[in-house]
Image: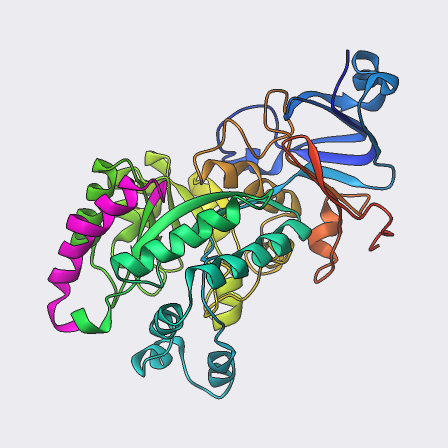
């Protein structure tokens, strides 16, 4: 049979076993690993996966439109970065220095920094300039092996500015091979002008912003920062239920700063994911596990801010589905590397390298509602694959702060080719 793209002779292939759901408990550490592996792609989807001799028996090299020789490379699904704030304006390195001098994230926010600083930056940035910045960030993500990214608004805090972010995101996504899943995060912070009347801002969100965003098809998800000093459980419930009325599935920034019951709310609403969870209670985490809510862990944030890391091993033992993401944003995690996130997950949260891979691919796909299409090298799935300059999947997290990516494939088409690069080993 003919195929559009045939990848042959990979030193190793790593992926989740066939399926469509998240990997739980011990299964998170039971990947499918093949040596001398091949993948055939037809019409943007994976047609066959297996040993090179077996795949080539059905899809001969001579009949393939294009052949990639993957000798000396690791073949894996593209990373799915399931939590970012990608359409951000400007950077905040001055806060990075301030924390080194003893200030905290909270004290910086109290004096007008933090999210409020990015809100001011956004007001001074045009939609065109923001779209150009996002295009550059999407290219950087692809160069680091990310083929799908979730991206949130949240630096506008008004209807027009939130729409500016989401429109810029859509414009940039239309010109990039990286697949973008947009999330509305108007409930990222209470704007200064609403501090004394926060109920009016919640009303603005539910009465005006959510209907407008949904009406323009600018987002697939609605997220709320449900935490101490931000939005209460009651406010978050109201906002997220309103989002569901308009077809925006719920996500939460949950219990990052304190245990306020956000994890339990995520379970109650059967949110797609609850993210951060540094202070989530055991009862809240158990409720999430029972409700099938994905726990998205963001070790880069804890690393940057010097916070305790999420209790990943306890979560695995509870039967929670874990996903990894970067949380790329200008304040608390100026990092776009999923591989670095895997390193932190292994060294600081004590996941195994294999568990980190599964959390960054198959489970991350489930955290954006795409577990039946993305995140696995499986016949019928979208052909999103990456070749790394490594002979073993453990090497990518082990040899950290290195760029291991050689080739990226999106929907069966080579979109990044650096195959002449030597191994980073």
- Taking the magenta stretch, the answer to whether it contains residue 215 is yes
Residue sitting farthest toward the bottom: 101
Residue drawn at 45 percent across, 47 percent down: 170
Residue 218, percent across and down? 36, 44
Left or right: 160, with 5 as reference point? left
Q: Does 224 appear above or below 316?
A: below
Q: 409 or 348: which is nearer to us?
A: 409
Residue 254 in sight from this viewpoint: no
- In the picture, residue 257 is in which quadrant? bottom left
> For residue 334, which quarter of the picture?
bottom right
x and y percent of residue 336 in the render? 58, 58
Q: Is residue 256 left or right of residue 316?
A: left
* Quadrant location, the C terminus: bottom right
Foreground residue among 329 and 312: 329
Q: Image check: 395 left or right of 144?
A: right
Magenta segment, prevailing SS (helix, strand or loop) = helix
Tell me the residue at 63%/26% (across/down): 44
Compared with residue 372, is residue 222 higher up or lower down, i.e. above or below?
Answer: below
From this view, report whether residue 23 is shown above or below residue 233: above
Q: Which residues are magenta?
A: 195-221
């Amino acid at each position: 049979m003919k195929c559009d793209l045939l990848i042959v002779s990979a030193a190793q292939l790593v992926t989740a076993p066939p399926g469509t759901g998240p990997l739980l408990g011990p299964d998170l550490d039971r990947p499918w690993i093949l040596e001398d592996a091949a993948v055939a792609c037809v019409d943007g989807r994976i047609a066959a996966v297996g040993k090179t001799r077996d795949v080539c028996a059905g899809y001969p090299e001579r009949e393939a439109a294009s052949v990639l020789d993957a000798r000396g490379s690791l073949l894996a699904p593209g990373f799915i970065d399931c939590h970012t704030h990608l359409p951000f304006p400007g950077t905040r390195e001055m806060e990075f220095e301030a924390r080194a001098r003893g200030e905290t994230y909270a004290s910086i926010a109290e004096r007008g920094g933090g999210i409020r600083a990015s809100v001011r930056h956004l007001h001074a940035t045009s939609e065109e300039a923001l779209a150009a910045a996002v295009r550059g960030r999407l290219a950087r993500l692809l160069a680091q092996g990310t083929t799908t990214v979730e991206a949130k608004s949240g630096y506008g805090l008004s209807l027009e500015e939130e729409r500016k972010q989401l429109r810029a995101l859509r414009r940039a996504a239309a010109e990039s091979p990286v697949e973008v899943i947009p999330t509305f995060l108007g409930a990222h912070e209470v704007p200064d002008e609403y501090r004394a009347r926060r109920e009016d801002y919640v009303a603005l969100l539910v009465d005006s912003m959510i209907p407008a965003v949904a009406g323009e098809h600018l987002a697939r998800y609605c997220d709320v920062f449900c935490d101490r000093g931000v939005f209460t459980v009651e406010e978050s419930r109201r906002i997220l239920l309103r989002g569901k009325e308009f077809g925006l599935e719920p996500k939460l920034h949950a219990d990052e700063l304190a245990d306020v019951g956000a994890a339990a709310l995520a379970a109650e609403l059967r949110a797609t994911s609850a993210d951060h969870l540094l202070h989530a209670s055991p009862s809240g985490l158990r409720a999430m596990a029972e409700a099938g809510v994905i726990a998205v862990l963001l070790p880069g944030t804890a690393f940057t801010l010097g916070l305790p890391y999420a209790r990943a091993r306890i979560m695995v033992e509870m039967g929670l589905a874990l996903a990894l993401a970067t949380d790329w944003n200008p304040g608390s995690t100026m990092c776009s590397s999923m591989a670095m996130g895997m390193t932190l997950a292994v060294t600081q949260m004590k996941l195994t390298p294999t568990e980190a891979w599964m959390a960054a691919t198959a489970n991350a796909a489930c955290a954006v509602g795409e577990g039946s299409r993305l995140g696995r090298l499986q016949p019928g799935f979208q052909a999103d694959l990456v070749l790394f300059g490594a002979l073993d999947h453990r090497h990518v997290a082990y040899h950290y702060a290195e760029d291991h990516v050689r080739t990226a494939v999106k929907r069966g088409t080579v979109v990044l080719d650096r195959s002449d690069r030597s191994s980073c080993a």
